[in-house]
Protein backbone atom coordinates (compact mmCIF):
# COMPACT_ATOMS: atom_id res chain seq x y z
CA UNK A 1 0.00 0.00 0.00
CA UNK A 2 1.34 3.45 -0.89
CA UNK A 3 1.65 6.16 1.78
CA UNK A 4 3.28 8.84 -0.39
CA UNK A 5 2.48 9.55 -4.02
CA UNK A 6 4.32 12.24 -5.95
CA UNK A 7 3.13 13.24 -9.42
CA UNK A 8 5.10 15.51 -11.77
CA UNK A 9 6.57 17.59 -8.94
CA UNK A 10 8.47 20.72 -9.97
CA UNK A 11 10.09 23.61 -8.10
CA UNK A 12 11.40 26.75 -9.77
CA UNK A 13 13.06 29.86 -8.35
CA UNK A 14 12.99 33.14 -10.25
CA UNK A 15 16.00 35.30 -9.41
CA UNK A 16 16.80 38.48 -11.35
CA UNK A 17 15.11 37.37 -14.57
CA UNK A 18 16.73 33.93 -14.27
CA UNK A 19 14.77 30.72 -13.72
CA UNK A 20 16.51 28.11 -11.58
CA UNK A 21 14.94 24.66 -11.64
CA UNK A 22 15.67 22.89 -8.34
CA UNK A 23 13.32 19.95 -8.91
CA UNK A 24 11.94 18.89 -12.29
CA UNK A 25 9.07 16.52 -13.01
CA UNK A 26 9.50 14.07 -10.11
CA UNK A 27 7.07 11.15 -9.93
CA UNK A 28 7.39 8.26 -7.48
CA UNK A 29 5.55 6.25 -4.84
CA UNK A 30 6.66 5.32 -1.31
CA UNK A 31 5.17 2.15 0.13
CA UNK A 32 3.87 1.94 3.67
CA UNK A 33 6.44 0.52 6.09
CA UNK A 34 9.51 0.78 3.86
CA UNK A 35 12.80 2.64 4.26
CA UNK A 36 12.90 4.81 1.14
CA UNK A 37 16.16 6.53 0.27
CA UNK A 38 16.79 9.65 -1.77
CA UNK A 39 20.43 9.41 -2.88
CA UNK A 40 22.31 12.22 -4.56
CA UNK A 41 25.10 14.80 -4.22
CA UNK A 42 24.73 18.16 -2.52
CA UNK A 43 22.56 20.42 -4.65
CA UNK A 44 20.76 17.56 -6.41
CA UNK A 45 17.32 18.61 -5.10
CA UNK A 46 16.99 16.26 -2.12
CA UNK A 47 16.27 18.84 0.59
CA UNK A 48 14.00 20.87 -1.72
CA UNK A 49 11.93 17.74 -2.34
CA UNK A 50 11.71 16.82 1.33
CA UNK A 51 10.64 20.38 2.18
CA UNK A 52 7.78 20.15 -0.33
CA UNK A 53 6.71 16.77 1.04
CA UNK A 54 6.72 18.22 4.58
CA UNK A 55 4.58 21.28 3.60
CA UNK A 56 7.48 23.69 4.23
CA UNK A 57 7.78 24.67 0.58
CA UNK A 58 5.05 25.11 -2.02
CA UNK A 59 5.66 23.31 -5.34
CA UNK A 60 5.65 25.27 -8.58
CA UNK A 61 3.53 22.48 -10.06
CA UNK A 62 2.63 18.86 -9.49
CA UNK A 63 0.75 16.95 -6.79
CA UNK A 64 1.74 15.25 -3.52
CA UNK A 65 -0.49 12.89 -1.56
CA UNK A 66 0.66 11.77 1.90
CA UNK A 67 -1.35 9.42 4.13
CA UNK A 68 -4.29 10.02 1.73
CA UNK A 69 -4.13 13.81 2.27
CA UNK A 70 -3.33 16.30 -0.47
CA UNK A 71 -0.30 18.26 0.77
CA UNK A 72 -1.51 21.51 -0.82
CA UNK A 73 -5.13 21.24 0.33
CA UNK A 74 -4.65 19.67 3.80
CA UNK A 75 -1.25 20.77 5.15
CA UNK A 76 -2.31 20.52 8.81
CA UNK A 77 -3.43 16.91 8.40
CA UNK A 78 -0.18 16.11 6.63
CA UNK A 79 1.84 17.69 9.49
CA UNK A 80 0.01 15.50 11.99
CA UNK A 81 1.02 12.48 9.90
CA UNK A 82 4.75 13.17 9.78
CA UNK A 83 7.81 13.50 11.98
CA UNK A 84 10.85 15.39 10.70
CA UNK A 85 14.54 15.35 11.60
CA UNK A 86 16.05 18.28 9.73
CA UNK A 87 19.56 18.45 8.32
CA UNK A 88 20.37 21.40 10.59
CA UNK A 89 20.10 20.97 14.40
CA UNK A 90 16.75 22.22 15.77
CA UNK A 91 16.88 21.34 19.48
CA UNK A 92 16.80 23.98 22.22
CA UNK A 93 20.23 23.44 23.77
CA UNK A 94 19.34 25.42 26.90
CA UNK A 95 16.68 22.86 27.79
CA UNK A 96 17.14 19.29 29.00
CA UNK A 97 16.35 16.29 26.82
CA UNK A 98 13.10 15.76 28.72
CA UNK A 99 12.11 19.42 28.40
CA UNK A 100 12.70 19.34 24.63
CA UNK A 101 10.40 16.33 24.32
CA UNK A 102 7.80 17.83 26.65
CA UNK A 103 7.68 21.07 24.63
CA UNK A 104 7.14 19.10 21.41
CA UNK A 105 4.39 17.01 23.04
CA UNK A 106 2.55 20.17 24.12
CA UNK A 107 2.64 21.53 20.58
CA UNK A 108 0.92 18.36 19.40
CA UNK A 109 -1.56 18.36 22.31
CA UNK A 110 -0.57 14.86 23.42
CA UNK A 111 -2.51 13.91 26.63
CA UNK A 112 -0.35 13.99 29.78
CA UNK A 113 -0.49 10.28 30.62
CA UNK A 114 0.27 9.24 27.03
CA UNK A 115 2.98 11.88 26.80
CA UNK A 116 4.83 10.50 29.84
CA UNK A 117 4.58 6.93 28.51
CA UNK A 118 5.86 7.93 25.08
CA UNK A 119 8.74 10.02 26.39
CA UNK A 120 9.92 7.22 28.66
CA UNK A 121 9.66 4.62 25.91
CA UNK A 122 11.48 6.74 23.31
CA UNK A 123 14.26 7.79 25.70
CA UNK A 124 14.85 4.11 26.47
CA UNK A 125 14.67 3.19 22.79
CA UNK A 126 17.29 5.77 21.82
CA UNK A 127 19.53 5.09 24.83
CA UNK A 128 19.05 8.52 26.41
CA UNK A 129 17.07 7.64 29.57
CA UNK A 130 20.08 8.23 31.87
CA UNK A 131 20.72 11.66 30.32
CA UNK A 132 17.11 12.88 30.22
CA UNK A 133 17.69 15.61 32.83
CA UNK A 134 20.94 16.89 31.30
CA UNK A 135 21.09 20.05 29.21
CA UNK A 136 21.28 19.33 25.49
CA UNK A 137 24.37 21.55 25.14
CA UNK A 138 26.30 18.83 27.01
CA UNK A 139 25.36 16.17 24.43
CA UNK A 140 27.56 14.85 21.64
CA UNK A 141 26.45 15.22 18.01
CA UNK A 142 25.25 11.63 17.90
CA UNK A 143 23.21 12.02 21.10
CA UNK A 144 21.54 15.15 19.74
CA UNK A 145 20.61 13.27 16.58
CA UNK A 146 19.09 10.45 18.65
CA UNK A 147 17.07 12.98 20.66
CA UNK A 148 15.81 14.60 17.45
CA UNK A 149 14.69 11.17 16.21
CA UNK A 150 12.90 10.53 19.53
CA UNK A 151 11.20 13.93 19.28
CA UNK A 152 10.12 13.24 15.69
CA UNK A 153 8.38 10.03 16.83
CA UNK A 154 6.63 11.45 19.88
CA UNK A 155 3.27 12.12 18.21
CA UNK A 156 2.88 8.73 16.44
CA UNK A 157 3.72 9.85 12.87
CA UNK A 158 2.96 7.64 9.90
CA UNK A 159 6.13 8.83 8.12
CA UNK A 160 9.46 9.89 9.60
CA UNK A 161 11.52 12.18 7.36
CA UNK A 162 15.27 12.13 7.95
CA UNK A 163 17.20 14.77 6.01
CA UNK A 164 20.88 13.69 6.00
CA UNK A 165 20.44 12.10 9.46
CA UNK A 166 24.13 11.41 10.10
CA UNK A 167 25.71 14.40 8.36
CA UNK A 168 28.90 15.50 10.14
CA UNK A 169 29.00 12.54 12.53
CA UNK A 170 31.95 10.19 12.96
CA UNK A 171 31.62 6.60 11.60
CA UNK A 172 30.88 5.10 15.03
CA UNK A 173 28.11 7.61 15.74
CA UNK A 174 26.67 7.04 12.26
CA UNK A 175 26.57 3.29 12.94
CA UNK A 176 24.80 3.87 16.27
CA UNK A 177 22.24 6.20 14.68
CA UNK A 178 21.39 3.55 12.11
CA UNK A 179 20.91 0.89 14.76
CA UNK A 180 18.41 3.22 16.47
CA UNK A 181 16.67 3.98 13.16
CA UNK A 182 16.15 0.27 12.52
CA UNK A 183 14.96 -0.22 16.07
CA UNK A 184 12.35 2.53 15.94
CA UNK A 185 11.14 1.44 12.51
CA UNK A 186 10.58 -2.06 13.79
CA UNK A 187 9.04 -0.92 17.08
CA UNK A 188 6.85 1.81 15.63
CA UNK A 189 6.03 0.11 12.29
CA UNK A 190 6.50 3.37 10.43
CA UNK A 191 7.67 4.49 6.99
CA UNK A 192 11.06 6.19 6.82
CA UNK A 193 11.96 8.63 4.03
CA UNK A 194 15.59 9.69 4.15
CA UNK A 195 17.95 11.77 2.07
CA UNK A 196 21.65 11.01 2.02
CA UNK A 197 24.82 11.31 -0.04
CA UNK A 198 26.54 8.51 1.90
CA UNK A 199 26.63 5.37 -0.23
CA UNK A 200 26.86 3.00 2.74
CA UNK A 201 23.70 4.53 4.23
CA UNK A 202 21.78 3.83 1.05
CA UNK A 203 22.44 0.12 1.61
CA UNK A 204 20.02 0.29 4.58
CA UNK A 205 17.11 1.24 2.30
CA UNK A 206 14.47 -1.07 0.86
CA UNK A 207 14.43 1.05 -2.30
CA UNK A 208 16.58 3.93 -3.49
CA UNK A 209 15.72 6.82 -5.79
CA UNK A 210 18.89 8.25 -7.32
CA UNK A 211 18.46 11.97 -7.95
CA UNK A 212 20.76 14.27 -9.91
CA UNK A 213 20.19 17.82 -11.16
CA UNK A 214 16.63 17.79 -9.82
CA UNK A 215 15.47 14.60 -11.55
CA UNK A 216 15.20 10.92 -10.67
CA UNK A 217 17.43 8.79 -12.89
CA UNK A 218 16.82 5.40 -11.23
CA UNK A 219 14.51 3.91 -8.60
CA UNK A 220 15.21 0.33 -7.53
CA UNK A 221 16.42 -1.86 -4.66
CA UNK A 222 20.15 -1.66 -3.81
CA UNK A 223 20.67 -5.16 -5.29
CA UNK A 224 18.90 -4.26 -8.54
CA UNK A 225 20.88 -1.05 -8.86
CA UNK A 226 24.20 -2.85 -8.51
CA UNK A 227 23.24 -5.11 -11.40
CA UNK A 228 23.39 -2.06 -13.66
CA UNK A 229 27.21 -1.91 -13.52
CA UNK A 230 29.31 -3.45 -16.27
CA UNK A 231 31.20 -5.97 -14.13
CA UNK A 232 33.65 -6.59 -11.31
CA UNK A 233 36.92 -4.89 -10.43
CA UNK A 234 40.14 -6.92 -10.48
CA UNK A 235 42.79 -5.62 -8.08
CA UNK A 236 46.31 -7.11 -8.27
CA UNK A 237 49.82 -6.52 -6.99
CA UNK A 238 52.99 -7.42 -8.85
CA UNK A 239 56.69 -6.52 -8.75
CA UNK A 240 56.57 -5.67 -12.47
CA UNK A 241 53.87 -2.98 -12.60
CA UNK A 242 54.70 -1.53 -16.03
CA UNK A 243 54.88 -4.93 -17.74
CA UNK A 244 51.57 -5.96 -16.15
CA UNK A 245 49.91 -2.68 -17.08
CA UNK A 246 50.96 -2.93 -20.72
CA UNK A 247 49.95 -6.60 -20.96
CA UNK A 248 46.46 -6.02 -19.51
CA UNK A 249 45.78 -3.00 -21.70
CA UNK A 250 46.89 -4.68 -24.92
CA UNK A 251 45.39 -8.14 -24.33
CA UNK A 252 42.05 -7.20 -22.73
CA UNK A 253 41.53 -3.69 -24.19
CA UNK A 254 40.65 -2.15 -20.82
CA UNK A 255 41.84 0.86 -18.85
CA UNK A 256 44.20 0.12 -15.97
CA UNK A 257 44.72 2.41 -13.01
CA UNK A 258 47.51 2.33 -10.46
CA UNK A 259 46.13 2.81 -6.98
CA UNK A 260 48.09 2.54 -3.72
CA UNK A 261 50.61 0.06 -5.12
CA UNK A 262 47.98 -2.04 -6.93
CA UNK A 263 46.62 -2.24 -10.46
CA UNK A 264 42.87 -1.92 -10.91
CA UNK A 265 40.83 -2.84 -13.98
CA UNK A 266 37.36 -4.08 -14.91
CA UNK A 267 36.10 -7.47 -16.01
CA UNK A 268 32.55 -8.50 -16.91
CA UNK A 269 32.61 -11.67 -14.80
CA UNK A 270 35.47 -11.67 -12.31
CA UNK A 271 35.06 -15.24 -11.06
CA UNK A 272 35.22 -16.74 -14.55
CA UNK A 273 37.95 -14.37 -15.72
CA UNK A 274 40.38 -14.81 -12.84
CA UNK A 275 41.65 -18.44 -13.29
CA UNK A 276 42.61 -17.96 -16.93
CA UNK A 277 44.17 -14.57 -16.24
CA UNK A 278 46.39 -15.94 -13.44
CA UNK A 279 47.39 -18.96 -15.57
CA UNK A 280 48.38 -16.89 -18.63
CA UNK A 281 49.90 -13.75 -17.02
CA UNK A 282 53.57 -13.35 -18.12
CA UNK A 283 54.54 -11.76 -14.78
CA UNK A 284 54.59 -12.80 -11.14
CA UNK A 285 51.39 -11.93 -9.24
CA UNK A 286 51.91 -11.14 -5.55
CA UNK A 287 48.19 -10.93 -4.73
CA UNK A 288 44.89 -10.64 -6.61
CA UNK A 289 41.24 -10.22 -5.64
CA UNK A 290 37.79 -9.33 -6.98
CA UNK A 291 35.83 -6.34 -5.76
CA UNK A 292 32.08 -6.33 -6.37
CA UNK A 293 30.33 -3.18 -7.71
CA UNK A 294 29.20 -0.67 -5.09
CA UNK A 295 26.45 1.96 -5.15
CA UNK A 296 29.19 4.52 -5.77
CA UNK A 297 29.97 2.68 -9.02
CA UNK A 298 26.25 2.60 -9.85
CA UNK A 299 25.88 6.35 -9.35
CA UNK A 300 28.84 7.06 -11.60
CA UNK A 301 27.58 4.61 -14.18
CA UNK A 302 24.24 6.43 -14.32
CA UNK A 303 25.42 10.04 -14.09
CA UNK A 304 28.99 10.10 -15.39
CA UNK A 305 30.29 11.72 -12.21
CA UNK A 306 30.89 10.81 -8.59
CA UNK A 307 28.54 11.34 -5.67
CA UNK A 308 31.02 13.50 -3.77
CA UNK A 309 30.85 17.21 -4.54
CA UNK A 310 34.64 17.47 -4.65
CA UNK A 311 34.76 15.11 -7.64
CA UNK A 312 35.48 11.52 -8.47
CA UNK A 313 38.20 9.27 -7.04
CA UNK A 314 40.36 6.86 -9.06
CA UNK A 315 37.68 4.18 -9.21
CA UNK A 316 35.22 6.81 -10.42
CA UNK A 317 37.64 7.92 -13.10
CA UNK A 318 37.99 4.33 -14.28
CA UNK A 319 34.22 3.95 -14.49
CA UNK A 320 33.92 7.26 -16.35
CA UNK A 321 36.51 6.16 -18.91
CA UNK A 322 34.70 2.88 -19.48
CA UNK A 323 31.40 4.73 -19.95
CA UNK A 324 32.89 7.11 -22.48
CA UNK A 325 34.41 4.25 -24.47
CA UNK A 326 31.13 2.33 -24.44
CA UNK A 327 29.24 5.37 -25.67
CA UNK A 328 31.83 5.96 -28.38
CA UNK A 329 31.58 2.35 -29.54
CA UNK A 330 27.78 2.66 -29.76
Image (cartoon, rainbow, N blue to C red):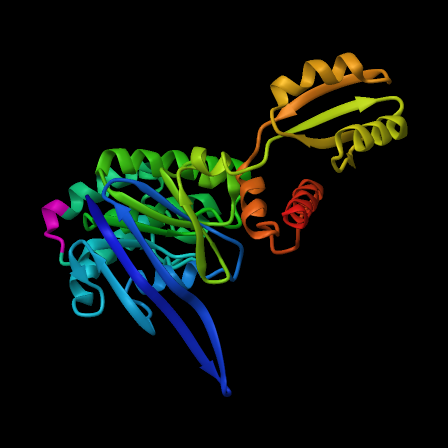
> On screen, 292 above or below 320?
above
Residue nearest the viewer, comparing 99 with 104: 104
- Locate residue 190 relative to residue 163 in the image: left or right: left
Residue drawn at x 12%, y 45% is 114
Residue 36 figure quarter = top left
Q: Is residue 41 visible?
A: yes
Residue drawn at x 85%, y 15% is 284
Q: Is residue 88 visible?
A: no
The image position of residue 326, as x and y in percent, is 65, 44
Residue nearest the viewer, comparing 217 with 59: 217
Residue nearest the viewer, comparing 176 with 16: 16
Residue drawn at x 10%, y 52% is 111
| Residue range corresponding to the magenta coloring | 110-114
The image position of residue 157, as x and y in percent, is 21, 50
Q: How many marks?
A: 0
Q: Outermost residue toward the front?
A: 330
Residue 191 figure quarter = top left
Magenta stretch mostly in which secondary structure? helix
- Please say whether residue 328 is one of the residues in the magenta stretch: no
The image position of residue 324, as x and y in percent, is 67, 49
> On screen, 165 above or below 279?
below
- Please say whether residue 113 is one of the residues in the magenta stretch: yes
- Locate residue 179 relative to residue 78 in the image: left or right: right
The image position of residue 244, as x and y in percent, is 84, 26
Specify the quadrant that holds the N terminus. top left
Amino acid sequence: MEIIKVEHLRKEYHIKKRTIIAVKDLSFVVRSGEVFGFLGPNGAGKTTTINMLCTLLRPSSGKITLNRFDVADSPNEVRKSIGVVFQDPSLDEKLTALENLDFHARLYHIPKKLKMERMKMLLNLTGLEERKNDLVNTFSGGMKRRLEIARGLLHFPKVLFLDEPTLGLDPQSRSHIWSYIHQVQKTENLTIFLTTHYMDEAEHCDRIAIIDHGGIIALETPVELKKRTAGDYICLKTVDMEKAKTYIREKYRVDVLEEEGSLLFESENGEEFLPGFVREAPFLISSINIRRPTLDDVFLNLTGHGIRPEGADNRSLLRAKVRMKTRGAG
